[in-house]
Image: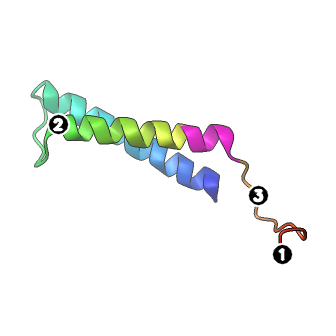
């Protein structure tokens, strides 16, 4: 589950970065500020990469923690 969330955040961050950079250079007009899209894209991208790198994806429940 954690890896799926990390993958979604990474893809969303990449989309935000691409839309923001295209908005800054004037070839794409969105309803939002392009700098806001760049900042959100960077945050989501690094959050997703961090989840993919450092979290274990286990669906098992330890008997010790119950």
Whether residue 52 is situated above or below residue 64 in the rendered picture: above
Seen in the picture, residue 64 relative to 12 is either above or below; the reply is below
Q: Name the residue under label 1.
A: 66
Residue drawn at x 19%, y 30% as measured from the top left: 22
Tell me where residue 29 appears, x and y as whole percent. 10, 40
Asked if the residues shown at circle 1 and circle 2 are in contact, with their CB atoms under 8 angstroms apart, the answer is: no
Tell me where residue 46 appears, x and y as whole percent: 47, 36
Q: Residue at the location (31% across, 42% down)?
A: 40
Q: In the rendered structure, are the residues bearing label 2 and label 3 in contact, judged by CB atoms less than 8 Å apart?
A: no
For the residue pair 61 and 15, the one nearer the viewer reads as: 61
Task: State the mark number for residue 34.
Answer: 2
Disc 3 marks which residue?
Answer: 58
CA gap between label 2 and label 3 equals 37 Å
Q: How far apart are marks 1 and 2 (CA)?
A: 47 Å
| Magenta region, main secondary structure | helix
Between discs 2 and 3, the one toward the N terminus:
2
Where is the N terminus found, in terms of image quarters?
bottom right
Start-end of magenta stretch: 50-55
Q: Which sits in the foreground, 48 or 18?
A: 48
Report the side of 46 relative to 1 (left or right).
left
37 in the magenta segment: no
Q: Quadrant of residue 62?
A: bottom right
Q: Is 52 inside the magenta-drawn segment? A: yes
């Amino acid at each position: 589950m954690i890896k799926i969330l990390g993958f979604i955040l990474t893809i969303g961050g990449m989309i935000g970065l691409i839309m923001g950079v295209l908005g800054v250079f004037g070839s794409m007009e969105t309803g939002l500020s392009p700098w806001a899209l760049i900042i959100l894209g960077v945050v989501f991208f690094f959050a997703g990469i961090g989840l993919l790198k450092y979290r274990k994806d286990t669906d098992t429940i330890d008997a010790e923690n119950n």
